[in-house]
Image (tube, helix red, strand yellow):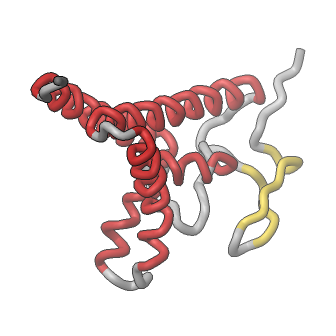
Amino acid sequence: IGKSFVSSVFNYRIDLISGDRPFITWQSFTVQTYLLAVLFVGAGIVLCFSLMAFGIGVFVRNSYISFFLFLIANAATLALPLQMPLNSIGYAVISVIVLSPVTLWLKHGLWFTDGDIDIVWTHFETLGLFVSLVVLTAFCLLALHYFRKRNLT
């Protein structure tokens, strides 16, 4: 059976600047390996959201308030970069938010490619997943440490 590669002149994507252009990935992916890679990163993002929800749920006793904090934290990662001027130093610092789980989820059609106009790093999906997992695991360990010291009575 012949291998069908994802990167070819037959697969196109719409770019914000240049319009239609070929869908080219960083590595040579077959359809099967691309599907496995996308499923792996997708499962990692689900794990990131689960770790975030767990950590917030441990810190906040009221489940409604913790849900709204979860929503606010994720919405802030989308709203903060839009509030910064493009030529400011603050925007450069906030551009790290592109590595957050929400932004990675929204950029799922561009995984393993050069991304779009707001992507600064190569392999942003694996870098973002790694950074998010490390930060959220540390957050959950801090939450567990806090939970052990909390008076449950």
> Which residue is at 26% across, 38% downward?
59
Give the image quarter of residue 116.
Answer: bottom right
97 shown above or below 48: below
56 shown above or below 97: above
Which corner quadrant holds the N terminus? Answer: top right
- Residue 117 picture location, percent across and down: 57, 68
| Left or right side of 111 for 137 | left
> Which residue is at 39% across, 85% downward?
87
Which corner quadrant holds the C terminus? Answer: top left
- Residue 44 picture location, percent across and down: 50, 30
Q: Nearer the viewer, residue 55 or 100?
A: 55
| Left or right side of 145 for 134 | right
106 shown above or below 57: below
> Residue furthest toward the top?
1
88 shown above or below 104: below
Count of number-bearing discs: 0
- Residue 78 picture location, percent across and down: 50, 63
| Left or right side of 10 for 141 | left
> Which residue is at 77% across, 38% downward?
6
| Left or right side of 74 for 138 | left
> Residue furthest toward the front?
153
> Which residue is at 82% across, 24% downward?
3
Q: Nearer the viewer, residue 5 or 98?
A: 98
Q: Nearer the viewer, residue 64 or 92?
A: 64
- Residue 85 picture location, percent across and down: 42, 84
